[in-house]
Amino acid sequence: MWVNFGFTNGDILDQGGGGSGSGGASSASELTVSAYTKSGTYALAATDLQTNLQTLVDHDYQTDAILETHMVEQSAHLSKNLDVVFVTGTLLGTDFPQFITSGTTDLQNFLGLLDLKINSITSGTVGPIGPSGTNDPFNIIVSSYTSGSYSLVSGTLQSNLQSLINYDYQLDANLRSHLANPTGAHSGTAISIIADSLIGLTGTDAQSAISGSYQVSYNHINNPSGAHAASAISFISGTSGINASDVQAAITQVKTIYTSGTSRLETVLGITTGDLTMSISGTYLSGTSISTDLLELDSALNAHVIKTSGSHAASSISFISGTSTISATDAQDALNAIGIRLAATETTSSALKFYTVMGGCGAVAPTANQVIGFFVFERAVTLKATATLDTMAYGNALTVATASTTCPFKKLTQANVLTSITGGQMVFASSAFAPSFANTSDVSFAAGDALIVYAPATPDATLANFSFTISLVLS
């Protein structure tokens, strides 16, 4: 607040104070001010002018400080903290009664309601915002209308739209229930049909029609006459030589051919009368009935299949040598030639039958008396003496022995009796890669016996990574 005091020629009337000067006061403290009150706390006191001026300055200072604080305080200016007062009878006061329960709301809420009101108005020429002329579905009034059991009631558009939604929901639920119900209107007895004698469709409903059609189909399938009679089934002869046009005539011709004593059966089967023996002299089939003929034919064929002589003899079966060196022309001679050659091969190779076993050790040197070879034989064999053994056994080591190393042989019988083999051993000389093999005399092993090769009782410190093979002779 700013207060201006005007003085003329530096003089002021004396308001009751003494003081110096030419007939007036010389200072504001000498002037007296009358009391005055404006709106409660704002007042002039009945005291000197100086005091009242200082009071006014203090008021202005405090007001300015409060105003500066208020202007920078954000919370006081938030729209939710600003009140909007609706005065009854004004435009805003009458247009928003459905949203506002009292005469006062905050600015934030008011702006939101105003935006909602504007958005509810559709494009086009509308009346003023409010109950009259508005497009708000809460306020548009719908006239009543009835169509069957469906109707619009005299009320707001919003309530009628909600009723229509409920109608649609219930209609959809009823329709789904009806579609999924196999009874009632969907029962076979409830579905009507039009009978058609041309196609054999009888009855007045689907259930009886289906039953009737099934019975007609069943009767047809199991009926051996009519369309299923042999005379009603067409026959195409092709290259068979049968010139009948239906199955019945074709069967009759076949029966006539095979009961007339001709050689047609021999031609068809590719056999001779010597291989196919019949019980009826002079004919191939008795001809009493088709089933009897077929049974006799089946019996004759079975007898032919299991026959080992005649056309089934090895001498009657031809042999084509192809790329083989067998020059025979029939299976008997070919088998004879093969047997002769096998016998000759058996004779020349009998002394060359061997049984070879293999043992050894990995990267780590074997421990004392470690088994480095264990061989169980499934047939009788012989470990030959040194003279032959040394040409039938071989070995090699990647890491040589520091000193001479001897690995002894032992025999384990099927009865679990372990014995040493005299002179049987494998010896790695110092720094030698290949070992030597020795055995005093031949040693026989029966089926189930085993040959075991051991590491020495005092193993070499370096010998490792070695392998060996020993061939025994089959007994």
Image (tube, rainbow, N blue to C red):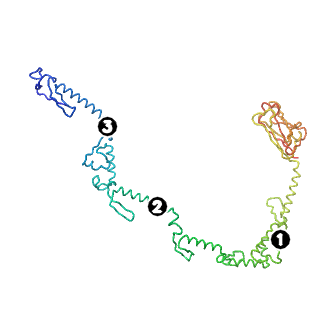
The residue depicted at 86 percent of the width and 57 percent of the height is: 339
Lateral position of residue 404 relative to residue 67, left or right: right
Mark 2–mark 1 distance (CA, rounded to whole Å) = 82 Å
Q: Nearer the viewer, residue 306 or 56?
A: 56
Q: Mark 2 = which residue? A: 174
Mark 1–mark 3 distance (CA, rounded to whole Å) = 125 Å
Q: Which label sits in the foreground, 2 or 1?
A: 2
Q: Position of residue 376 (x, y in %)?
A: 83, 43
The extreme right residue here reads 441
Q: Amino acid at mark 2?
A: Asn
Q: Nearer the viewer, residue 397 or 137?
A: 137
Q: Nearer the viewer, residue 285 or 28?
A: 28
The extreme left residue here reads 23
Q: Amino acid at mark 3?
A: Ala
The residue depicted at 39 percent of the width and 59 percent of the height is: 164
Q: Secondary structure at mark 2?
A: helix
Lateral position of residue 234 relative to residue 298, left or right: left
The residue depicted at 25 percent of the width and 47 percent of the height is: 88
The extreme top residue here reads 20
Query: Does label 2 or label 1 sit earlier along the sequence?
Result: 2
The residue depicted at 27 percent of the width and 32 percent of the height is: 66
Query: Does label 2 or label 3 sit earlier along the sequence?
Result: 3
Does the residue at mark 2 contact the one at mark 3 (Cβ under 8 Å)?
Answer: no
Q: Mark 3 = which residue? A: 76
Q: Position of residue 317 (x, y in %)?
A: 82, 65
Q: Mark 1 = which residue? A: 275
